[in-house]
Image (cartoon, rainbow, N blue to C red):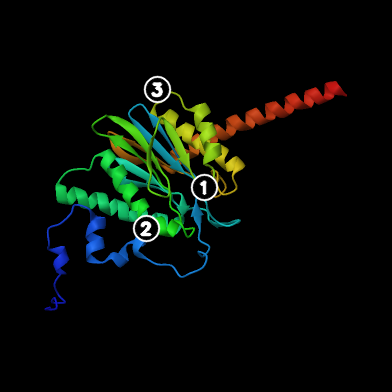
Amino acid sequence: MTAEHPARLPSSFMTPGSSSFVEFLAAHDPSLLPSSRTLPSGTAPPAPHGTTIVAASFEGGVVMAGDRRATAGSMIAHREIEKVFPADEYSAVGIAGTAGLALELVRLFQLELEHYEKIEGTLLSLDGKANRLSTMIRGNLGLAMQGLAVVPLFAGFDLVARRGRIFSYDVTGGRYEELDHHSVGSGSVFARGALKKLWRPGLDAQGAVRVVVEALFDAADDDSATGGPDAVRQIWPVVATVSEAGYLRLADDELESVVDDISLERTRQARSSRTRHGSLGGDLR
């Protein structure tokens, strides 16, 4: 077999093939795929984990938010990790699970969607994007069984149905469409309770942003792995909306205003509760 000239691209780059970047990489150099790596025997090494991600629909789109804390066991590994990213112009993906692998999965997913658009000359449908992500998660099952699981949350604006849609996954790649709102990560139980109480049909983008931020407040209140807004360090959640206008990340000053309003309201409620309980105690004496 004749060796390829070192100054030229390998022949795999010149051969017409699939519109899937993952399939191209599997044919060109499968060792570059996370699913093709083998770990040494024994337990998986300690690695930072990211939580919590929430998403909610509104009239004309969907909003996704993630806290900024990564943990390694009982320790805070990072206070400013970002967990919500644009998958493409009309979709967003949030990560929960092993942070390093999750970030790599997001970058590969972004390349997958960009590659498809370049090869086919059109955007992949929202269902198609959700299915591609499902396949990539399934490919990570071997690592997940060794404790290095990645469970993302995917949401976007459906250009055909003209509405926002939310998709959740399990470690085997199972794909599930969620109605109205959803959350993943260690604080998801508490966030989901808040979403059920606060979300309502007909919300606009501003109202939905407040709902997801309040859900993160509640998650951080009961889950030590979830970091709430940090006014001292000026660390705010990553919050993004996806609508017909595309992916839009909210600026920190907007989030600071939302957080201040929620904090003031909850402070008033706490003071009112303490005053009421104090007066009741006085009556009993």
Sequence-first disc among 1 and 3:
3
Sequence-first disc among 2 and 1:
2
Which corner quadrant of the image does residue 201 belong to? top left
- Kind of residue at badge 1: Gln
Tell me residue 66's x, y (percent): 46, 44
Tell me residue 252's x, y (percent): 44, 43
**Residue 47: in sight, yes or no?**
yes
Q: Which residue is mark 1?
A: 234
Q: Sort mark 2 into few (<14), some (14-19) or many (20+) by Cα contacts within 10 Å.
A: few
Q: CA distance from mark 1 to mark 3?
A: 31 Å
Tell me residue 70's x, y (percent): 51, 54
Q: Which residue is mark 3?
A: 202
Q: CA distance from mark 2 to mark 1?
A: 27 Å
Q: Secondary structure at mark 1?
A: loop
Q: Sort mark 1 into few (<14), some (14-19) or many (20+) by Cα contacts within 10 Å.
A: few
Q: Is residue 116 left or right of residue 101?
A: left
